[in-house]
């Protein structure tokens, strides 16, 4: 049985994404040789020239660093989003009980921003699951461990500047509370959980029988889409969404991640324990960086 991979996701895979993904999967003490990056890119249909050009541009933006000629590691500029992506395995541990209150961010009084800064702020809010309740007011359920202070720190780390006004919102009347709960397309989220979980299960069964490069490509693309969906998931509480369906997807991805590591182990080297299977941190990291 073949696995249908989201074509929108497939089109997002670029040389920049591949470089950051491969570097972020390696332990910090193992810089990656440019030749290994070229081989990994080739498995994903990225030409050597495209990969080398991307590597030079990413280095200029401090998204990658070089300690020695021809050896590269992930740069400090990419670390905030890389941290967010690496936390996907333990993401259930970041969610607590919900008392019906909301975390709110006030945006109406913000100074005018250039396009790139405004985009960074918008994406930081999206990464933390915020939606617009009223013009100038973004909210999300107050169900994350650490509450308002945790969200404030994460927004700042993700490039939201100047520092946001973040506060707890409670006591909404019945009409506004119902509107707040309806801000997220819950039906689409739940359908996505089920569909992506099924793709992971089917692909996981067939990966061991695929040729090496095909297995590397499929695990990269499908695993990357799953990680991206998990990282961008708003982590809504049980009162709003079917959390069991979400947990089933997360569990399926943990299993698939182990299979993906096996697919890429020959690329990394038998003695290296990958921190994770290569996935889609690249698209997120480059999006949050400034050119």
Image (cartoon, rainbow, N blue to C red):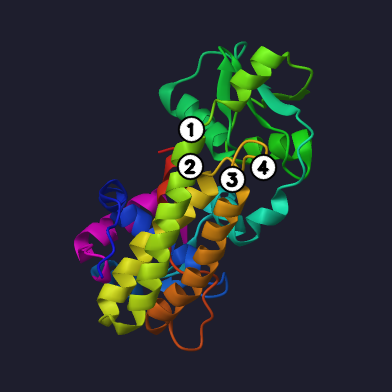
Which circle's residue, 1 or 3, is located before the other in the chain? 1
Residue, disc 2 = 189
CB atoms of marks 4 and 2 within 8 Å: no
Classify mark 2: residues with Cα within 10 Å, few (<14), some (14-19) or many (20+): some
Residue drawn where x is 55% and y is 53% of the image? 245
Disc 1 secondary structure class:
loop
CB atoms of marks 3 and 4 within 8 Å: yes
Residue drawn where x is 27% and y is 55% of the image? 53
Q: Which mark is residue 242?
A: 3
Classify mark 3: residues with Cα within 10 Å, few (<14), some (14-19) or many (20+): some
Q: Is residue 277 above or below residue 280?
A: below
Residue, disc 1 = 185
Which circle's residue, 3 or 2, is located before the other in the chain? 2
Disc 2 secondary structure class:
helix
Is 44 placed left or right of 267 in the picture? left
Is 244 placed left or right of 20 in the picture? right
Snapshot quadrant of residue 89: bottom right
Residue, disc 4 = 238
Disc 4 secondary structure class:
loop
Mark 3–mark 4 Cα distance, whole angstroms, equals: 6 Å
Q: Which residues are magenta?
A: 43-65
């Amino acid at each position: 049985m073949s696995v249908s991979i989201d074509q929108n996701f497939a089109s997002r895979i670029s040389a920049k994404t591949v470089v950051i993904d491969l570097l972020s999967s390696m332990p910090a003490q193992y810089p990656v040789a440019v030749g290994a990056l070229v081989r990994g890119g080739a498995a994903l249909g990225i030409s050597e020239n495209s990969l080398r050009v991307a590597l030079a541009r990413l280095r200029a933006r401090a998204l990658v660093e070089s300690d020695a000629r021809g050896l590269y590691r992930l740069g400090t500029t990419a670390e905030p989003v890389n941290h967010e992506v690496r936390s996907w395995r333990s993401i259930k541990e970041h969610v607590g009980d919900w008392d019906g209150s909301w975390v709110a961010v006030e945006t109406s009084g913000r100074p005018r921003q250039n396009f790139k800064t405004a985009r960074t702020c918008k994406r930081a809010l999206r990464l933390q699951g915020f939606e617009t309740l009223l013009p100038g007011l973004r909210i999300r359920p107050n169900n994350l461990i650490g509450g308002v202070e945790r969200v404030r720190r994460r927004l700042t780390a993700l490039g939201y500047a100047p520092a946001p006004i973040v506060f707890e919102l409670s006591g909404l009347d019945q009409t506004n509370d119902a509107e707040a709960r309806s801000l997220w397309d819950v039906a689409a989220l739940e359908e996505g959980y089920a569909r992506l979980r099924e793709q992971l299960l089917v692909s996981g069964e067939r990966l061991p029988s695929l040729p090496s490069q095909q297995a590397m490509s499929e695990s990269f693309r499908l695993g990357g889409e799953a990680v991206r969906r998990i990282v961008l998931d708003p982590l809504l509480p049980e009162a709003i969404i079917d959390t069991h369906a979400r947990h089933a997807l997360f569990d399926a991805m943990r299993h698939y991640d182990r299979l993906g590591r096996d697919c890429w182990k020959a690329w990394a080297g038998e003695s290296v324990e990958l921190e994770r299977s290569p996935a889609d941190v690249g698209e997120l990291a480059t999006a949050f960086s400034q050119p």
